Structure formats: structure tokens, C-alpha cells
Amino acid sequence: MKLHEYQAKQLLASYGVPVPEGRVATTPEEAKTIATELGGKVVIKAQAHTGARGKAGGVKVAETPTDAFEIAQEIIGMQLVTKQTGPAGLPVTSVLVEEAISIEKELYLSVAIDGSMAMPVIIASREGGMDIEEVAEQRPDAILKQYIDPACGFQGYQARALAFGLGLSGELNRPATALIEAVTRSFLETDGSIAEINPVVVTTDGRILAADAKFSIDDSALFRQKNLEGLRDRSQEADKELEAQDAGIGNYIKLDGNIGCLVNGAGLAMSTLDAIKMAGGDAANFLDIGTANSPEAVVAALKIIGTDPDVKAVLVNIFGGLARTDIIAQGVIDAKNQGLIPQPTVVRLAGSNVNEGNELLDNSGLDLVRANGFAEAAKSAVSAIS
Ligand code: GDP
Ligand code: MN
């Protein structure tokens, strides 16, 4: 679950991380009021679940409260397209209005899970404000890391080592160490999956602040982070995943190929993806209907697949156990008849009532390709595209 910058900053502040003064506004009037309260120059920042807002016109400086009104009017209601959002962008319904800070240095700090090391890792760099991926590629020596061994936990010396590594000695060392410690603690205690402060700013008047904040909570841990659940903003989440959740469909995963897959069961999903790969293709998604056993559930699922613009062919691969394949087949026929899957459609059924299921497909008079077995199904789907 991703948080907005303003929510992330509130969370960080509650752990003692210094952040610029500011508040969120949902109307230009409110933005103006906040700018007046902050007494002058402010920064107006689009709240959307993406980075790289600065370059996309989502972060602007306002010299006066009237400026703040006008900029907020421009930004609120916009569809913010950054290089991270894809062409559709994300809706902006609020802005963060913050005191403008006078920047001397921009640094990078994040805490994330390193899957290959099976440990959280704190990452820091003097090269803040810009694309950290680029820095990591071009100058890997500019990236500092401290792994947090779960056996002994986070140690104070790790924050001090990073602060020195960032060149923050003297007066700044203590506040920098405290900031790194507080960000790390906030990540660990809220089951974070990423906490990224880019940039951490050293101001010309000698303060150190989290000027930006990106924070995500591990979805699998939300059951024990109940007090954070309210921070979810569904308007920022992929429509199709929400649609699938709302239709009671267990699992919808978006991938970057062009074959849409309807399956039942996670193991079958994985094998289907492999079969497609082996046939020389790539899946656009998979939608696991789990134990759903009604034509309506299949129709709802195929509607989600059929409206994905990346999908050029549909592969239905169902093993009937508790689910009866004739019921699934009826769902496919209904979806086809309703025009929900105009793409070439390959169906492979096995298990319960497979003869009845296949008969329904054959007698439907619809343009459906029937396949026997995984390999044939995958091959048919791939060749339906090329
Ligand atoms: P992002 O583009 O989505 O990562 O948004 P950021 O919050 O990181 O803002 C982008 C850039 O705008 C930062 O790297 C800063 O250089 C600049 N910026 C943000 N806030 C301020 C501010 O208060 N004062 C000044 N001078 N620059 C700011
Ligand atoms: Mn940033």
C-alpha cells in the first residue's frame, strides 16, 4: 500500500524525522490560506503515487499566496503523467503546500527490503534529488549501504557510518544520524516495503530535512498495521486490480506481454506463464478465478482481461476440480457473446465434465480455438497474434 507524500511525512514526523512545515489542500482557496499561514514563499506539490513529479510539472514554487492559489488551481484536477506512471497518468485531487526551503545540498536516503539478501537495507548517497537508478548504474561507488541483520537488529553505529559517508560531520552529524535512525525505525515498525527520502536536504541555514517522501507498507502486513489502513487511496490504484477485488476474484496480476490468461489456481497460473514463454510468447496478465464456479464470475474475469489494451489474444486454461468445466465454458461463451473478449480466444479445459464443456464450446458456433494440453494451448495463443 503506497502512501501519499503528505501522509508519509506525517508518519515520518511522528517518528521524529524533521520535515518542512506544511499541510495538504484539496482546493485552491485552502492552498492560499495555508500559504498565508506559512508566511510567504511556498512549494505546491501534486499528491499522486508517483515520483519524478518535479520534471512533469507537479512541483512548483509559489512566491505569494495568490500565486499559490493559481498554481493549486492548475495542479488540482490534473492527470499527472510522469515517466513512472505510464501514458494514462494519475489523478491529482490534493496538493501539499509547504514552506519553501533554501537548499544547499540534496542527498538520498532509503530503506528497503533486499530480497536476495533477505534483509532490510539502508541506502544512502550524496547524489540526491535525481534518479538514483542512474547513479547506481553509472557510479556504484556513490551508493552507501548498511544491511540490517534481523538477528541483531538495527545498530546505532550504522546510522553514524552513513552520516559520515554522506559527508555530514561537525554540527550536522548529530541531526543527520538522528534522521537516519528515525527513518529506519519508521520503516521497520510499520512493516514498510520502501521508505525513500529523495532528497534529504541540507538547508542554507544549516537544518537537515526530509524534503520528499515516498513510503509503502507491505500489503501482507496490513492485518497488523490496522491504524494505517485508512491511508489507502483507491483512486491511485490500478483500476483492474480493484475491479478484480470487487468481483471477489482472488488474484489479478498485470504483466507486460500481450496474452491475457484466465486460470484457476496459482500453480496452474505459473505453469501457464511458463508454457507461453516456451511457445515464444509473453503473458499480459493472469487472472486467477480460484474456486469461483459460476458463469458470472468467468464473465466478470474475462471482462477485465478483454478491456486491457495490451491483450491481443486470450488463453483460458482451466482444470476442473471443484469447478466444473462446463460451467466455466458457459462463462466463456457468455463473455464472447457479449463482445467482452473480441480478441482471438483459445480454450483448454481438463477435469470435471470436460466432455460436456468441450461440447458446449464446439456447439456454440463461436470463433473459439479449442486446445488439448498446455503446449498446444500456448502455441495456439501465440500464433493467433503473429
Ligand atoms: P519528485 O520530483 O516527485 O521526486 O518531487 P520532489 O519533492 O523530490 O521535488 C523535486 C525537486 O524539486 C527536488 O529535488 C528539489 O530540487 C525541488 N524542491 C522541492 N521542494 C523544494 C523547496 O522547498 N525549495 C526548493 N528550492 N526546491 C524544492
Ligand atoms: Mn523526489
Image: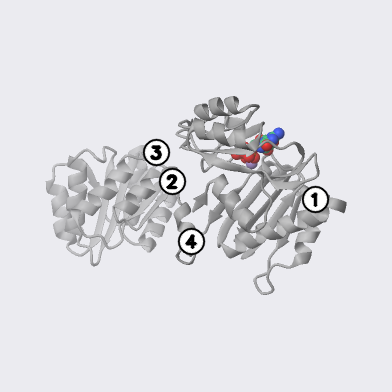
Does mark 1 have its CB less than 8 Å from ligand 1? Answer: no
Identify the residue shown where x is 22% and y is 60%: 293
Label 4 and label 3: CA atoms lie apart by 37 Å
| Label 4 vs label 2, nearer the camera | 4
Residue of label 2: 237
Of helix, strand and loop, which one carries label 3?
Answer: loop
Locate residue 193, reporting x and y percent.
Answer: 56, 57
Residue of label 1: 166
- How would you rate the neighbour count of disc 1 (Cα within 10 Å): few for under 14, some for 14-19, many for 20 or more? many
Label 4 and label 2: CA atoms lie apart by 20 Å
Task: Indicate which disc residue 63 carries.
Answer: none
Label 1 and label 2: CA atoms lie apart by 35 Å
| Label 3 vs label 1, nearer the camera | 1
Label 3 and label 1: CA atoms lie apart by 44 Å
Of helix, strand and loop, which one carries label 2?
Answer: loop
Residue type at numbered disc 3: Asp
Task: Indicate which disc residue 310 carries.
Answer: 3
Q: Which residue is most to the left?
A: 363
Residue type at numbered disc 1: Leu
Residue of label 4: 227
Left or right: 364 in relation to 234: left
Of helix, strand and loop, which one carries label 4?
Answer: helix
Residue type at numbered disc 4: Asn
Q: Earlier in the sequence, mark 4 or mark 1?
A: 1
**Are discs 4 and 3 less than 8 Å apart at CB?**
no
| Label 4 vs label 3, nearer the camera | 4
Identify whether 290 is placed above or below 85.
Answer: below
* Figure label count: 4
